[in-house]
Amino acid sequence: MRGTLVVLGAFLLASLGISYAKPDFAQEKPGSAEPKITPEDAAKKNPVPPTSDGLAEVRKLYSYNCAMCHGKIGDGKGDLAADMKLDLRDWRDGSSLDKLTDGELFWIISNGKGKMPGEGDRTKERVRWNFVNLVRSFARKDAGDKPKTESPLS
């Protein structure tokens, strides 16, 4: 009788363990969990015009949440980016953003990209659109020019 209880107990424990295990086909493959942008999201237009108040609001959030990687001036040379060996865009160079629509920037800000977490529901939609305005504002007036380096002759 005692042997039967031990076998029954072992069987129940094994059954319980199996019931909580995921089958192999249900496990996600690494990298497949990153969401993809839809054409509709990419085509969205920024409904929030850039204003000094809106930019001031997001500059504060940017300094807390983004500058550590993207740099205080949007140059992609924040301390954490250097530590993590990330190669980020220099937003001061307008050509670095030319191929991205406002909808694409908004989607990246909202959902994240690679190691960057998204703002998602942490911020209101209006604030995320103001982040798009801020990122665009980093570009110099001479947006087509690359950041200048000193000439070896000078």
Image (cartoon, rainbow, N blue to C red):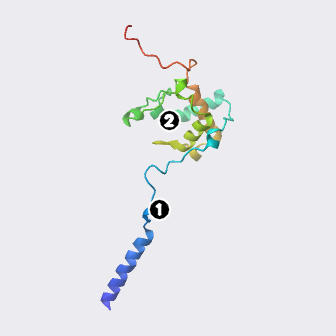
Give me the C-alpha separation between circle 1 and circle 2: 35 Å
What kind of element bears circle 1?
helix
Q: Is residue 15 left or right of residue 1?
A: right
Q: Earlier in the sequence, mark 1 or mark 2?
A: 1
State if disc 2 and disc 1 touch (CB < 8 Å). no
Q: Nearer the viewer, mark 1 or mark 2?
A: 1
Q: Is residue 64 left or right of residue 125?
A: left
The answer to which of 46 and 2 lies nearer the viewer is 46
Residue occupying image coordinates x 59% and y 42%: 123
Residue 116 in the image, given as x and y percentages of width and height: 48, 41
Q: Can the viewer see residue 127? A: no
- Crowd around label 1: few <14 · some 14–19 · many ≥20 (10 Å): few
Residue occupying image coordinates x 52% and y 18%: 145
Furthest residue to the top?
154
Q: Quadrant of residue 16?
A: bottom left
The residue beneath circle 1 is: 26
